[in-house]
Amino acid sequence: MIHHINIQITDRERTREWYERVLGAEFLDRGPALNRRQLQLRLGTGEIHTSDTEDLVKVPRVHFAIEVEDFDSMLAHLDSQGVPYSRTGGGAFTGTGGDDPRQGTREDTGERYTYISDPDENLIELVYHAGGLENSSGEAVDLTHDTGNVRWTQIEGFVEAAYAEEQVTVS
Ligand SMILES: [Fe+2]
């Protein structure tokens, strides 16, 4: 299980707004000191952490992929948000998945897929497996359903104490 990925960003507010609006991410409040260190977001069962930089290092084809619950609804959402998407990842990938320039279907799994880019041009693949998930024995298993509140167990009271301590320090 992947706990988090870390992406390079140049503008935390822009990144947070985009991931919340486009992908339904949730801001993870870690308290004032840790929030200053980096931006952390939850997306499904995983987290996205960020590294601030003013000198983005772009590596062709590097991307992460997100399984979405309803592919057509996601494409409609991208259209409504003005987020472009393409089967070839803006030219990073070619040749497979059909002829539709905006989305493809993989021949081995039937997986539907497309690529988008975040405001810092981090490449994100969106995938959807109509056949669902199965375990190593080939038995169907469910997705995690508690999508509104999936998070790793935190140290109880840490964030509240951090805010209380910060107020004392500031005043
Ligand atoms: Fe991929």
Image: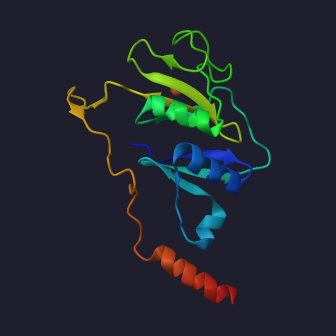
Which residue sits at x=51%, y=17%?
Answer: 104
* Residue 58 occupies quadrant: top right
Which residue sits at x=31%, y=40%?
Answer: 143
Which residue sits at x=58%, y=48%?
Answer: 21
Circle count: 0
* Residue 144 occupies quadrant: top left
Q: Quadrant of the C terminus?
A: bottom right
Q: Closer to the camera, 33 or 94?
A: 94
Task: Say left or right for 60 vs 25.
Answer: right
Image height of 153 relative to 67, above or below: below
- Picture colour scheme: rainbow
| Residue 109 % position (x, y) | 38, 18
Image height of 24 relative to 35, above or below: above
Q: Closer to the camera, 67 or 85?
A: 85
Q: Closer to the camera, 60 or 74?
A: 74
Task: Say left or right for 8 vs 46.
Answer: right
Image height of 100 relative to 20, above or below: above
Which residue sits at x=42%, y=11%?
Answer: 107
Image height of 25 relative to 33, above or below: above
| Residue 141 % position (x, y) | 24, 36
Task: Say left or right for 69 vs 56.
Answer: left
| Residue 161 % position (x, y) | 50, 81
Q: Quadrant of the N terminus?
A: top left
